[in-house]
Structures are given as structure tokens and as C-alpha cells.
Amino acid sequence: MNENGQVVADTRSTAWDTYAQSKPQRRKTNAKGETTWFNWTQYPDHGPGGDVLDLTPGDRVLDLGCGSGGNAAHLATLGMKSVGIDLSAKQLGKARERWPGVDGMELHQADALTYLGDTCTIFDAVYSVFGAAWFTDPGLLLPVIHAKVKPGGVFAFSQRPPADGCYGCQASYIPRGPEEDPAVVKRWDYEPDVWVLILKEHGFVGVSASVLDPPPGSSRTGTLFVRGLQGG
């Protein structure tokens, strides 16, 4: 690994390329017949929408770990200047295939810490849906997010809730070929009240964190959703 962590980034991008191959493209329409939509949870047609970001047309918004680009594309169609970054070239390829010619959307292959450290753009909101906010040390990520969100701007993210007793830095295992060991990436899991404290420690205010229930009738886990405002 070099001093910039290049080998680590390459290893993670390979893992996420593997993950991308296991996931189908987003549906052409959702249950309402919409061709673009925002989804915070792991369930279709469930949970809050993009309105929780408090954006208006022309605002700049950054998706940390945009995957195949559905949320970023939706915000662009609403008139936002929507930027999505992802480590995986395959995920970004799927995004460009699924959302060709969407005005106002930019996609970049980049590590979240590197991109935020290098960009001069101040965003009106930053978000992560099962993305880089889950898989990056918050002690490193939150200061650079705080520096690149306007005062009063929203930072929000969603991910799976932690398993009981499994808090802090954990390991996620991404299956590969039958003759290969799983790829391993780090993730950060905390209970909602701990996320509130962590964001407040890094200058965010009005912080809320809760676990959204799964859809009615589902016995699977809910979705952790955290939201705060840049405190200036």
C-alpha cells in the first residue's frame, strides 16, 4: 500500500465490481409507474423519498457510492446538479447504460475521501444509500463531508442496522467465484443513538437516527436512517 492508500482502493473496487455483477438493473418503472425515483431502503417502493434532502432545482448534491445511479438520476431529472461517485467501474458502467443522456448528472470513479478532499465544490446536500458512509471510517469521512456541505445543508445516509453486540468496524464478505475466497471490505456499524453522538461530535446539528420498519408482512430487518444538518 502506498501513502495514498492506492492498493486498498484497488482492492475495494475489485470487490465492488464483483458485487455489481450480482445485482440486476433497477426496474424500468416503480409501483407508481414512475421512471425515476429515490429509494433509501433495501426494499422496493418503501421508505422516504429524496425530499428529505431539502433540495430545490439548481442545487448541487453528491451521492457517495452511487452504484448503478438510480437515485442520482432521479435528482437530476428534478433539476438538481447531481454528482455520483463510486469505486466500481462496473457499477458506473451499469449507471451509464441504464440512465443515458440524463441532463445534470455527473458520474466519477473515485474514493469518497479522495474525491471530497480534492473537490472545490460546496454541495447543498450529501447522501449515501448503503454506500460510502457505511464503508468508510466516520472519523475520516465526516470532517471532509462537513467541509464540503453548505451551512444548514443536509447530510443523510442509510444502511442495515447493526447486529446486536457487533459495533464499530466490522467485516463484510462479498462472494466471488467458486474457487476464490470472498472479498472482504470494512464497514462501520453503530446503534442509532451512537450515530447521533458521532455526527454531533463532527459539527452536525439537528441530528436524527432511527431504524425504519421493513414493509408490512416482512420478517426481515429494517433500515437504519440517519440525517443531520451542517452546523456551520
Image (spheres, helix red, strand yellow):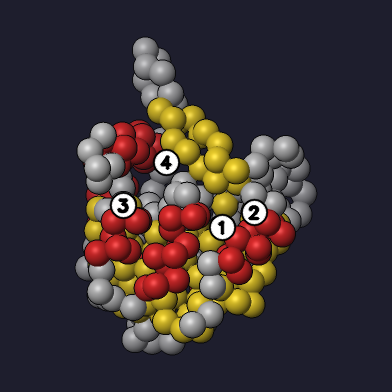
- What is the crowding at mark 3: few (fewer than 14 residues within 10 Å), some, or many (at least 20)? many
User: In the rendered image, which quarter is residue 99 located in?
Assistant: bottom left
Identified at 60% across, 76% down, the residue is 205
Reading the chain from its start, which is encountered first: label 2 or label 4? Answer: 4
Identified at 43% across, 55% down, the residue is 140
Looking at the rendered structure, the kind of residue marked 3 is Asp
Q: Horizontal placement of 137 versus 179: left or right? A: right
Q: Which mark is residue 111?
A: 3
Foreground disc of the pair 2, 4: 2
Q: Secondary structure at mark 1?
A: strand
Q: Are dots 3 and 2 in contact, CB under 8 Å? A: no
| Disc 2/disc 4 C-alpha distance (Å) | 19 Å
Dot 1 corresponds to which residue? 158
Q: Secondary structure at mark 4?
A: loop
Dot 2 corresponds to which residue? 223
Looking at the rendered structure, the kind of residue marked 2 is Thr
Q: Are dots 2 and 4 in contact, CB under 8 Å? A: no
Looking at the rendered structure, the kind of residue marked 4 is Lys
Indicate whether 37 appears above or below 216: below
Reading the chain from its start, which is encountered first: label 3 or label 2? Answer: 3
| Disc 3/disc 2 C-alpha distance (Å) | 24 Å
Dot 4 corresponds to which residue? 23
Instruction: Give residue 162's position: percent from left, percent from top.
Output: 66, 44
